[in-house]
């Protein structure tokens, strides 16, 4: 005889199934860990430790991507920002980090295609089309584009992540910034260098006997730019911490930034701080915050006056060294080349062949008569580099990206807007095209509104830092209830 199942029975059945699924979700990481360990042990015995680490890492990554595409992609992007100048292993001539980025991009695109009911499933960003146009109209050497593969892949993965969860990008930036700050600070206090880029002599690693922080980035100037870009992420992470941990992390962060002795990044940070203070003038003028700012500037003045860092830092800004002189000559030559080829440019990757003879003639010598620097064929100016190699169209694309990023964030996220303005100032003293963290920040800010609207789990007033987002007026619960009743 058939029994009729009551609604209560069906409800209890569903609860039982959901409970089984919840229990399975809790123990699945344990099963996964044991499975990876067992598989890794067998792979080590058969193929060695490096192969086992790569294979097991790939399995964990695929599991994360299948479980949560955003979290898995965030791990890969974070690894990209942290690995810096460390040469990753290659698979078929392609770096392992690029292979992982391609896998993440494929999963994100597939996830977007399956989860979308629109006629146009995947909407690629307009800047990808404009970049393709710039490449086509300029006589670019295809082999020279390999240096932009990692930044471009990072930017594309971040674009799809912004559409799903914008706050994850801030967490990536914050964790990467704290990671680099801790390593850089340790390098300075221990007078060691984890990695130092080959184009500089080791004597350039010290300023007044103090080791410049470089972290895994390998260059103090680019470490300073990385810390500048990651500052909004650090603010988003530390906002919920207690006062003492927050002061500790910001002290570590600012100390590592100062120990880079990067003049261009310092100028960008000063401009960013000035814009932020103007935008948040009403909140800064509160007595408690005003006292904190005065104490901070007083502590900085004492550091400059009495600490061993102060005098080398002052000399760094007051003197004109050989690096500054050679850089000015290279920039003048790059400007002349841009004027002569303003429409299509020389082609990406071709500028160094024109500046190489001039760079060889400008190599400074140290006290022993040995070349202090290898020939630097980069004008160390992003705008001149883009204009000389890509022409007026490429330069206009870069300036438009900066303008759009600031315009979309200046009212609702002054912290992000100030960072972009400071970064654009630092770009006049460094080549930032090959820095993945710069592309990460720019994609986040250019698509800031899009990320807020399309992410169901992200609310600007709930998840972002007060220093990043300007909140709207608060509505009392009773008033909100009455409004909803009126609408009904």
Image: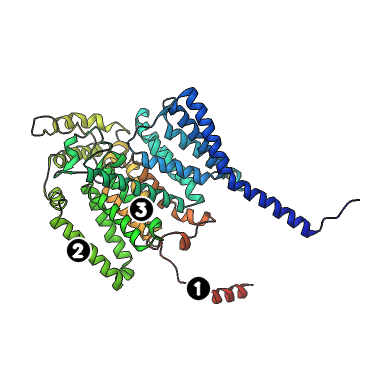
What residue does disc 3 label? 403
In the picture, measured across the screen, residue 81 lies left or right of residue 299, that is right
Percent of width and height locating residue 256? 26, 49
Percent of width and height locating residue 19? 66, 52
Disc 2, SS: helix
Percent of width and height locating residue 355? 21, 32
Return the residue nearer the eye: 274 or 307: 307
In the picture, measured across the screen, residue 182 lies left or right of residue 24, that is left
Disc 3, SS: helix
Are the residues at dot 1 and dot 3 in contact (C-beta closer than 8 Å)?
A: no
Disc 1, SS: loop
Percent of width and height locating residue 335? 22, 40
What residue does disc 1 label? 475
The answer to whether residue 383 shows anywhere in this view is no
User: Looking at the image, is mark 2 or mark 1 earlier in the sequence?
Assistant: 2
Residue 473 sits above or below residue 126 on the image: below
Of badges 1 and 3, the one in the foreground is 1
Q: Which corner quadrant of the image does residue 131 belong to?
A: top left
User: Looking at the image, is mark 3 or mark 2 earlier in the sequence?
Assistant: 2
Return the residue nearer the eye: 290 or 41: 41
> Which residue is at a point 26% across and 61% down the rendered structure image?
274
What residue does disc 2 label? 298
Of badges 3 and 2, the one in the foreground is 2
As drawn, the label of residue 433 is none
Label 1 – label 3 distance at C-alpha: 33 Å
């Amino acid at each position: 005889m058939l029994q009729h199942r009551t609604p209560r029975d069906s409800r209890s059945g569903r609860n039982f199934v959901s409970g089984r699924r919840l229990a399975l979700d809790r123990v699945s990481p344990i099963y996964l860990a044991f499975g990876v360990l067992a598989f890794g042990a067998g792979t080590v015995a058969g193929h060695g430790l490096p192969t086992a680490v790569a294979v097991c890492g790939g399995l964990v990554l695929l599991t994360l991507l299948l479980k949560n595409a955003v979290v898995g992609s965030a791990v890969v992007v974070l690894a990209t920002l942290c690995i810096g100048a460390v040469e990753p292993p290659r698979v078929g001539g392609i770096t392992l980090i690029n292979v992982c980025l391609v896998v993440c991009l494929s999963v994100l695109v597939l996830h977007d295609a399956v989860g979308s009911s629109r006629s146009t499933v995947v909407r690629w960003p307009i800047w990808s089309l404009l970049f393709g146009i710039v490449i086509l109209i300029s006589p670019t050497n295809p082999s020279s584009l390999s240096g932009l593969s990692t930044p471009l892949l990072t930017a594309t993965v971040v674009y799809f992540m912004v559409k799903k969860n914008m706050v994850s990008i801030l967490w990536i930036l914050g964790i990467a910034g704290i990671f680099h700050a801790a390593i850089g600070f340790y390098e300075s206090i221990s007078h060691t260098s984890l990695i130092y880029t080959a184009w500089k002599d080791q004597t350039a690693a010290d300023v007044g006997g103090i080791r410049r922080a470089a972290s895994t980035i390998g260059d103090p100037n680019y470490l300073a730019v990385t810390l500048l870009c990651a500052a909004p992420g650090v603010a988003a992470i530390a906002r919920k911490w207690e006062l003492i941990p927050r002061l500790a992390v910001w002290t570590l962060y600012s100390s590592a930034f100062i120990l880079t002795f990067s003049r261009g990044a310092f100028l960008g940070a000063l401009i960013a701080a000035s814009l932020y203070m103007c935008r948040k003038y009403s909140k800064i003028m509160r007595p408690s915050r005003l006292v904190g700012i005065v104490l901070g500037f007083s502590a900085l003045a004492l550091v400059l006056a009495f600490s061993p860092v102060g005098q080398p830092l002052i000399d760094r800004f007051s003197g004109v060294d050989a690096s500054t002189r050679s850089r000015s000559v290279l920039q003048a030559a790059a400007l002349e080349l841009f004027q002569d080829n303003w429409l299509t440019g020389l082609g990406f990757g071709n500028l160094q062949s024109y500046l190489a003879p001039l760079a060889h003639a400008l190599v400074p010598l140290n006290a022993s008569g040995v070349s202090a620097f290898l020939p630097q064929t980069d004008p160390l100016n992003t705008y001149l580099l883009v204009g000389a190699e890509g022409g007026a169209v490429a330069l206009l694309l870069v300036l438009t990206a900066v303008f759009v990023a600031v315009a979309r964030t200046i009212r609702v996220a002054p912290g992000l807007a100030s960072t972009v303005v400071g970064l654009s100032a630092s770009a006049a003293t460094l080549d930032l095209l090959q820095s993945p963290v710069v592309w990460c920040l720019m994609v986040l800010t250019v698509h800031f509104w899009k990320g807020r609207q399309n992410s169901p789990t992200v609310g600007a007033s709930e998840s972002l830092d007060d220093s990043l987002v300007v909140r709207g007026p608060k509505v009392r619960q009773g008033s909100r209830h009455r409004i909803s009743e009126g609408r009904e």
